[in-house]
């Protein structure tokens, strides 16, 4: 079947199988940032935005996204660049394999809640597993980004 | 002791690859492997122990798009080991690429190569196999001298004698010690006789095992793999495939985590075999399920110990025996077990009069174990630290005081650690600082929060090594470029740890340049100098020292070349950041001048390669303290706070060292409370996915705080020791201790699940 | 993963229902647990274009469309206000935000999963389901039925100014529950208690002996918790044993009923 998805702002029309996953679709269309970590919808590595809502692309049929917009980290480089340096400053990027999903969901969090508490950050990102960092450095990084943004606003 | 102050070393610089990783650039194996490779899949045994009676691939081969299906009949008959260790390995050569004899539920039965995933999956279903099911050895306690043999084959071959005997299901066995343990124990006021059990745990790195293989323009086998051990992988492939090492090149891209899992060549041989047979590129990506059931998890160990002490808290004797379950193949079995004693007993060198340490490593028909961060030390430390906590509670002593009384200190010789001297040790300061940071005095007492909820605290110490002494080799090549920048070539593997960056920091410190001027390359067997690989906590300590030495050599070469060009004696010039100067007359040759000079009519290569190995393995030390809230009614545990103070010598990059520590602590929390590898009564693995194998989320780890107490290791680069492994060792005993404080029950078997707590089961 | 031969974005419930009469068809919810199944299905029927993703006020309460995400439900102000935040409390531990953005109320209820927090909570609210063919039936009855070829359209939650308390025990904070428990205090009826993740599907615990008829005193609650532990069948799976779950029935029942009188 033929589908058209607005992928990072550009229409992409392609022939897919009825059971092609959005994860495989975006990877095949130049969005290698999207990773697969668990195959059981539990790790958050494959997070993309479907009509601006963060979802697990491993659990969405490409066909279901037909006519919708899909955003991956490739399409959010500028918005991501604003804060990922703060994660890098903590050394919390580590192996990096979970980073794109984590960065995507953090962008979603900050769009939804620009000034979250630590507890709100932890809850929102609970579905993003990371085996390297122990999470604390990611939290410190987000916190220092928010602090620097507040200072910048003053 | 405060360390020296450096310009680059000791600073928290960003990882060189940080922005690429955080912005999702395509740098991992499946991102960079060329398209069009054959998809490789493995049909796996459903039975823990069986012989293939018949196997028919006719229908599978008829599936459109299937290129090949291989069985045991097609593969070389030379046995090999896939553990990434220095030759000659202690690991027995007990594997074939495919064997007619299947030794665990998950052992490969056939290799399928197809144009598409779907074709390979379809072909897999059409392979007809009849199995002769054999009785299986599923309990490590009854494995030794069991009439059922996991490896009855005549060509089982141990390259080293480690006390193994395949006719007894025994991979390795040893007893050693110092002093008369029985006599000292008999003289002690109190002897605790305890058995502790730690199950297998999966590394669960986010990127599963994966390898791409192709033939290059010279007909050589090019292997791109997510591996910590490029050189060992080349040697393993050479033996398994029966082709010369010069025909194989192994490279690693960025690695999505390893934690030791990728110190074993878990999946490399399968696509490599396909490429050799078909001449075509091939790619194998393990599913999460395959990584869970046929990976290389931590060894299940049962540690039986007797601890002898006096009433005043003086710990006088430790008698430790470890039974280690290596599963279906030997691999890291002979080596991991040693750490369960050698990296736990020496913590109490302080007053120890005698010790004994013995072990058996047995084969079973379960998933083969491998290398996981901590590598046996984790299991041994859970036992010894728990026993010391039990002693303290029995004697009514503060468990930090009993440690202060008995701990190993700087300057001591450690009989239980190969007699090595403890040259740099801040363990005492780690304890003092951690108590302060944690507010031990106020948080150690148990607090009732109402409705069955109780808060309590626990403590543990840990040590590890910084390499395998006299074995591990780290090398570095440093080259000067025409613009005055450097290339640093290494064979160590950055798997997210940041070793590319910290080695560049050392080079920048030595060459007195910004770290941006050092480009790091690694690892590729064709281009990198030999390195045993990134494991055994060795990269900072061993490869780092090689970097330091290589830089010194290059500086000497630069000075020699400059002296020659300036027509003065070598003693008449000095290396400076801006170039080599002749102080006598102020003349300078910039690095750029020298690099260009070496490219024109020159016989000097402005590069230096140094290999380094260490006769000692200086232990890093650590103290961890946990505060938990136990819901004594449901048995749920919440870790509220974890404080740790680490002595890793000089931290080369404190931010990266801290993240190593925090990551290790959270893995340790997982091990303590939720991670487990179990089998049903038929020997089939239960935790096949992350639905059953729970990893701690960011809601499960409370608040972490890590600090460093510096020591200065004279044999390490810039005084550094190691950080990567020790960090996983304190949570299990500290949390078990806190749970005892809250509930009055010692849990001597991990993980400590809510059910065990609520029902008072040990 | 489950493979499909066709995909149809249904344009009407009638079309979805007709397509679903083929035994090999599958209605898509959030696709989350469906994905972990193997095998091949015929047509994947997608209800996402039918406007079933809204929560609407009705004369008697709330109509929750089958395609409403768990995340929307979790954050619904009025439903949370009505239940003392029980929707947020019960749903927030389910895997993660991205998962709950996909997971649907319809998928959760249709699956009648043993581990379902959603089912436990909705049973405590005395919800009904609206099926395209069979019409409205009580959720308690629906939960007992084996899946058939009907289409779940909405879940109907009555306006019940109840006091509600939700409890669950877990090994890890976002793991599937060891046991779930919801207690509700309706305006003019005796308290309702639901136990789920036994690990079998959620069930009501009827007060057959009238233990609570004299009111929710601490003594009555203790007695009822003992009674519930005896009355609720539990089972063993990799997360916990039947014996432990029976213990949890007692603990969580005590806490949930206790929560009603605080």
Image (cartoon, coloured by chain):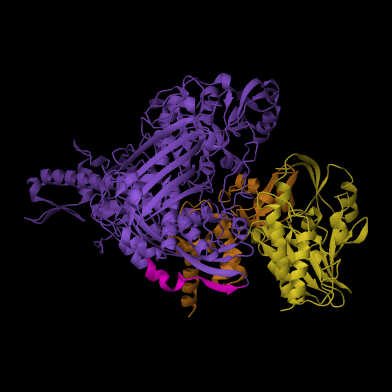
Chain colours: A orange, B purple, C yellow
Name the quarter where the C terminus of chain C is drawn.
bottom right
Q: Is residue B535 in sight in this rendering? A: no
Q: Is residue C86 above or below residue A15?
A: below
> Eyeballing the image, is B706 above or below B237?
below
Q: How many numbered marks does the figure carry?
A: 0
Decide if residue B269 is in sight here. Answer: yes
Magenta region includes residue B446: yes
Camera-side residue of C190 and B235: C190
In the displayed image of the protein, which residue is found farthest to the right? Answer: C134
Stretch in magenta? B434-450
Give percent across and percent down for residue B11: 33, 61
Viewer-side residue, C118 vs C252: C252
Is B546 part of what is drawn in magenta? Answer: no
Query: Where residue B567 sits in the image (x, y, percent)?
Result: 7, 45
Q: Looking at the picture, how far across and down is residue B312, in whole percent?
A: 34, 62
The N terminus of chain C - image quarter? top right
Left or right: B155 with respect to C257?
Answer: left
Question: Which one is nearer the viewer's eye here, A98 or B398?
Answer: B398
Which of C51/B499 is in front? B499
Q: List x then y, in percent, for residue C224.
A: 78, 68
């Amino acid at each position: 079947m033929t589908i058209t998805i607005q992928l990072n702002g550009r229409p992409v029309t392609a022939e897919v199988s009825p059971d092609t996953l959005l994860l495989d679709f975006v990877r095949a269309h130049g969005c290698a940032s999207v990773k697969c970590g668990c195959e059981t919808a539990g790790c958050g590595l494959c997070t993309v935005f479907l009509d601006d809502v963060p979802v697990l692309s491993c659990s969405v049929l490409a066909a279901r996204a037909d006519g919708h917009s899909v955003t991956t980290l490739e399409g959010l480089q500028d918005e991501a660049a604003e804060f990922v340096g703060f994660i890098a400053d903590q050394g919390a990027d580590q192996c990096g394999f979970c980073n794109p999903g984590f960065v995507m969901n953090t962008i979603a969090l900050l769009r939804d809640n620009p000034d979250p508490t630590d507890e709100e950050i932890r809850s929102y990102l609970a579905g993003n597993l990371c085996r390297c960092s122990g999470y604390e450095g990611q939290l410190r990084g987000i916190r220092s980004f928010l602090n620097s943004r507040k200072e910048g606003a003053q | 002791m405060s360390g020296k102050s450096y310009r680059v070393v000791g600073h928290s610089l960003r990882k060189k690859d940080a922005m690429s990783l955080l912005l999702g650039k395509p740098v991992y194996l499946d991102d960079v492997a060329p398209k069009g490779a054959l998809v490789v899949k493995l049909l796996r045994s459903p039975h823990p122990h069986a012989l293939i009676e018949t196997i028919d691939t006719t229908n599978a081969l008829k599936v459109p798009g299937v290129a090949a299906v291989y069985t045991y009949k097609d593969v070389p008959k030379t046995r090999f080991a896939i553990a990434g260790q220095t030759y000659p390995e202690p690991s027995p050569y007990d594997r074939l690429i495919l064997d007619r004899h299947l030794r665990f539920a998950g052992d490969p039965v056939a290799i399928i190569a197809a144009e598409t995933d779907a074709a390979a999956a379809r072909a897999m279903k059409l392979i007809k196999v009849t199995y002769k099911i054999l009785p299986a050895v599923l309990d490590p306690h009854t494995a030794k001298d069991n009439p059922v043999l996991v490896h009855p084959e005549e060509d089982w071959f141990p390259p080293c004698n480690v006390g193994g005997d395949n006719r007894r299901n025994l991979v390795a066995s040893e007893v050693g010690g110092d002093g008369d343990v029985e006599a000292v124990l008999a003289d002690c006021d109190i002897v605790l006789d305890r058995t502790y059990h730690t199950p297998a745990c999966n590394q669960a790195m986010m990127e599963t095992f994966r390898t791409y293989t192709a033939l290059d323009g010279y007909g050589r086998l090019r292997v791109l793999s997510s591996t910590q051990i490029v050189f060992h992988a080349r040697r393993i492939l050479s033996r398994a495939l029966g082709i010369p090492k010069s025909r194989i090149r192994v490279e690693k891209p960025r690695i999505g985590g390893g934690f030791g899992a990728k110190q074993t060549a878990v999946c490399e041989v399968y696509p490599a075999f396909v490429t050799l047979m078909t001449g075509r590129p091939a790619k194998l990506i393990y599913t999460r399920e395959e990584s869970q059931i046929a990976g290389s998890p931590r060894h299940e160990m049962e540690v039986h110990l007797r601890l002898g002490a006096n009433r005043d808290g003086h710990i006088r004797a430790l008698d430790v025996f470890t039974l280690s379950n290596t599963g279906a193949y030997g691999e890291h079995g002979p080596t991991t077990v040693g750490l369960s004693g050698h990296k736990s007993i020496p913590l109490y060198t302080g007053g120890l009069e005698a010790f004994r340490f013995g072990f058996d490593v047995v084969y079973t028909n379960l998933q083969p174990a491998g290398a996981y961060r901590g590598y046996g030390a984790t299991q041994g430390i859970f036992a010894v630290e728990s026993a010391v906590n039990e002693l303290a509670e029995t004697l009514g002593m503060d468990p930090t005081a009993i440690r202060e009384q008995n701990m190993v200190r700087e300057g001591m010789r450690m009989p239980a650690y190969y007699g090595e001297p403890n040259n740099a040790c801040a363990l005492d300061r780690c304890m003092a600082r951690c108590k302060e940071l944690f507010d031990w005095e106020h948080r150690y007492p148990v607090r009732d929060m109402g409705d069955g909820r109780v808060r309590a605290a626990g403590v543990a110490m840990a040590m590890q090594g910084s390499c395998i002494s006299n074995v591990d080799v780290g090398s570095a090549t440093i080259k000067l470029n025409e613009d005055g920048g450097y290339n640093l070539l290494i064979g160590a593997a950055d798997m997210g740890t940041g070793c590319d960056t910290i080695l560049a920091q050392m080079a920048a410190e030595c060459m007195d340049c910004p770290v941006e001027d050092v480009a790091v390359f690694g690892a590729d067997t064709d281009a990198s100098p030999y390195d045993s690989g990134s494991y055994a906590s060795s990269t900072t300590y061993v490869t780092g020292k090689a970097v330091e030495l290589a830089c010194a050599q290059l500086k000497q070469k630069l000075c020699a070349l400059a002296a020659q060009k300036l027509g003065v004696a070598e003693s008449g010039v000095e290396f400076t950041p801006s170039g080599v100067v002749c102080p006598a007359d102020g003349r300078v040759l910039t690095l750029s001048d020298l690099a260009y000079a070496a490219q024109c009519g020159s016989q000097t290569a402005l590069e230096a390669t140094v290999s380094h190995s260490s006769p000692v393995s200086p232990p890093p030390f650590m103290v961890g303290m946990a505060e938990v809230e136990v819901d004594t009614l449901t048995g749920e545990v919440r870790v509220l706070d974890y404080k740790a103070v680490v002595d890793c010598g000089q931290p080369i990059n404190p931010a990266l060292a801290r993240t190593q520590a925090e990551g290790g602590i959270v893995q340790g929390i997982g091990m303590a409370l939720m991670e487990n590898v179990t089998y049903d009564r038929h020997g089939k693995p239960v935790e096949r996915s992350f639905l059953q194998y729970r990893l701690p989320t960011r809601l499960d780890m409370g608040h972490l705080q890590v600090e460093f107490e510096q020591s200065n290791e004279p044999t390490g680069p810039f005084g550094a020791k190691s950080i990567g492994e020790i960090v996983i060792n304190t949570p299990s005993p500290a949390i078990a201790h806190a749970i005892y404080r809250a509930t009055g029950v010692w849990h001597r078997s991990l993980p400590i699940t809510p059910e065990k707590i609520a029902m008072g089961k040990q | 993963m489950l493979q499909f031969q066709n995909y149809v974005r249904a344009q009407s419930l009638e079309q979805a229902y007709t397509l679903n009469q083929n035994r090999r068809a599958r209605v898509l919810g959030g696709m989350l647990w469906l994905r972990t199944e193997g095998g091949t299905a015929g047509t994947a029927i997608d209800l996402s274009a039918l406007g079933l993703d809204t929560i609407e006020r009705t004369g008697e309460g709330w109509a929750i469309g089958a395609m409403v995400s768990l995340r929307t439900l979790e954050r619904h102000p009025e439903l949370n206000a009505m239940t003392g935040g029980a929707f947020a409390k019960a749903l927030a531990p389910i895997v993660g935000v991205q998962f709950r953005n996909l997971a649907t109320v319809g998928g959760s209820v249709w699956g009648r999963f043993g581990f379902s927090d959603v089912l436990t909570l909705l049973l405590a609210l005395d919800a009904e389901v609206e099926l395209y063919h069979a019409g409205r039936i009580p959720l308690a009855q629906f939960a007992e039925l084996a899946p058939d070829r009907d289409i779940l359209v909405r879940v109907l939650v009555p306006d019940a100014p109840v006091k509600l308390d939700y409890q669950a025990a877990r090994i890890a904070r976002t793991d599937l529950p060891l046991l779930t428990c919801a207690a509700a205090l309706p305006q003019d009826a005796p308290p309702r208690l639901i136990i789920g993740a036994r690990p079998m599907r959620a069930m009501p615990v009827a007060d057959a002996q009238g233990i609570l008829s004299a009111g929710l005193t601490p003594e009555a609650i203790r007695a009822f918790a003992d009674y519930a532990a005896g009355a609720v069948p539990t089972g063993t799976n990799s997360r916990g044993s039947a014996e432990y779950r029976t213990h949890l029935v007692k603990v969580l029942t005590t806490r949930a009923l206790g929560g009603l009188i605080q």
